Amino acid sequence: MFGTDFAIITTSTRKTMKRILLIMIVATMAMTACRKDRFEPKTPESMEQLQVPANFDWKTTKDYQITFNPSQSGLVQVTNSQNVSYQRAFLTAQQSYVMKLTLPTFEKSVKVSFAGKETVLNLSGANLTVNLN
């Protein structure tokens, strides 16, 4: 009677120990497998250590000169795509008006509003001409 009880305890103890061993192995594998390899670039400590291409333009703004040729008098407004106004001016009929703007370099176009009409002007060069009818 004592021998069979001992065998049952030993069998259940073995199963428990196998489960504990299996859990420890899985936990060890999970801990070592979750480590991420990260590329962390070296941060320069001074401006001299900064590596910048020779053709990099440090400017954050660009200057434009827009010549308006209105056929009638009225208020012209130049805005960005979110309708933030850059500049307004009153134009006199048949007289050219030159507007100088300094805009962020990320702007590729502006909206021109005149006499109830709105047109998109692509910022393709530093000197632009707009004929307003």
Image (tube, rainbow, N blue to C red):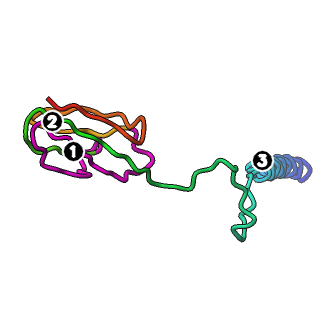
Per the image, label 3 sits on a secondary structure element best described as helix
Instruction: Name the outermost residue toward the bottom.
Output: 46
Residue named by callout 2: 70
| Residue for badge 1 | 97
| Mark 3 or 1: the one toward you | 1
The residue carrying mark 3 is 33
**Three-letter code, disc 2:** Pro
| Region rendered in magenta | 80-108
Question: Is 46 on the left-hand or right-hand side of 9?
Answer: left
Q: State the image coordinates of residue 15 (x, y, percent, origin top left).
A: 82, 46
Determine whether the residue tagged by mark 2 lies in a helix, strand or loop.
Answer: strand
Give the distance between the C-alpha atoms of the residues marked 3 and 2, in whole angstroms: 70 Å
- The disc at residue 9 is none
Between tags 3 and 2, which lies in front? 2
**Residue 8 appears in view:** no
Looking at the image, is 44 positioned above or below residue 21? below
Q: Marks 3 and 1, Cα distance to the nearest angstrom?
A: 68 Å
Q: Which amino acid does label 1 sit on?
A: Tyr
Evaluate if marks 1 and 2 touch, with contact meaning CB atoms under 8 Å apart. Answer: yes
Q: Where is residue 122 in the image (x, y as percent from the top left)?
A: 36, 34
Judge by depth and name the residue closer to the eye, 72 or 13: 72
Q: Earlier in the sequence, mark 1 or mark 2?
A: 2
Which quarter of the image is occupied by the C terminus?
top left
Q: Is residue 89 part of the magenta span, yes or no?
A: yes
For label 3, the crowd category at 10 Å Cα-Cα, with few meaning under 14, some 14 to 19 and many 20 or more, is few
